[in-house]
Image (cartoon, rainbow, N blue to C red):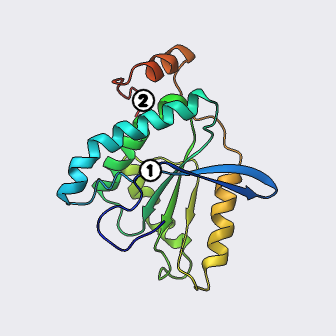
Amino acid sequence: MVSSDAAPCTSDFTPYDVPIKGKPYRLWDTPGLNVASGLKLLRRRKTSTIGSLKGFLRERYRRGELELLVFCVQGGRARAAMSKAYKIFCRATRHIAIPVVIAITHLERVQPTMDAWWQDNERRLRDLGLFFDGYACLTCLSPHHRRWASQQDIRALISAEYPQPKRALSALSVREYLDDPNARCMVC
């Protein structure tokens, strides 16, 4: 579900079963953090959304259902607000050694290719402390001459094999993190 409204439209964790290259995947659409938004509604929701996201990820991990997290952002300047969202996202992921990739949308006007956004912004993202195991620069507009390529890029991003992140915690630390809902990020 998408919306052009300022208010968020995804309020629940929704699974989608999708075949990619003949292999079944379960993709979860989650409520966004919307850290960059100045809306009071989002500020009130932020704390509950963070807790819900962490609990959701904890449960998926316990069930052995978590293999990759896709950090979706709109293209534009790499700003501190994106860093805040990443740090919140990181707290719930790097503890459990799950690869994190980034999908950047709204890049249909970037020239000469949408990947130029990544080339122009990768260093800035790293300077902000944002590190990713992979990326895809996308447009979701339909119809758009770059949409087919974007679909192929996101499928490749999801189906790629990623090594376990090097900054993973020990098994004991993972267990402590999963069992303690107030645990803080030690590696992010």
Local SS, label 2: loop
Point out which mark residue 187 bears.
Answer: 2
Q: Tell me if residue 40 can be seen.
A: yes
At a point 43% along the width and 61% down the height, the residue shown is 73
Q: Tell me if residue 93 can be seen.
A: no
Q: Would you say the residues marked 1 and 2 are in contact, meaning their CB atoms lie under 8 Å apart?
A: no
Residue 146's x, y, as percent? 61, 80
Q: Nearer the viewer, residue 154 or 112?
A: 154
Q: Is residue 29 above or below residue 91?
A: below
Residue 6 located left or right of residue 112? left
At a point 39% along the width and 47% down the height, the residue shown is 86
At a point 51% along the width and 21% down the height, the residue shown is 174
Q: Give the mark nearest the N terminus, 1 or 2.
A: 1
Q: Nearer the viewer, residue 164 or 140?
A: 140
Judging by the rendered image, the residue that carries numbered circle 1 is 12
User: Which amino acid type corresponds to the residue marked 1 in the rendered image?
Assistant: Asp
Q: Quadrant of residue 34?
A: bottom left
Q: Is residue 124 above or below residue 183?
A: below
Could you give the CA–CA distance between mark 1 and mark 2, rounded to whole angstroms? 28 Å
Q: Is residue 138 above or below residue 135?
A: below
Point out which mark residue 31 bears.
Answer: none
Local SS, label 1: loop
User: Which amino acid type corresponds to the residue marked 2 in the rendered image?
Assistant: Val
Residue ranking furthest to the left:
40
Q: Quadrant of residue 22?
A: bottom right
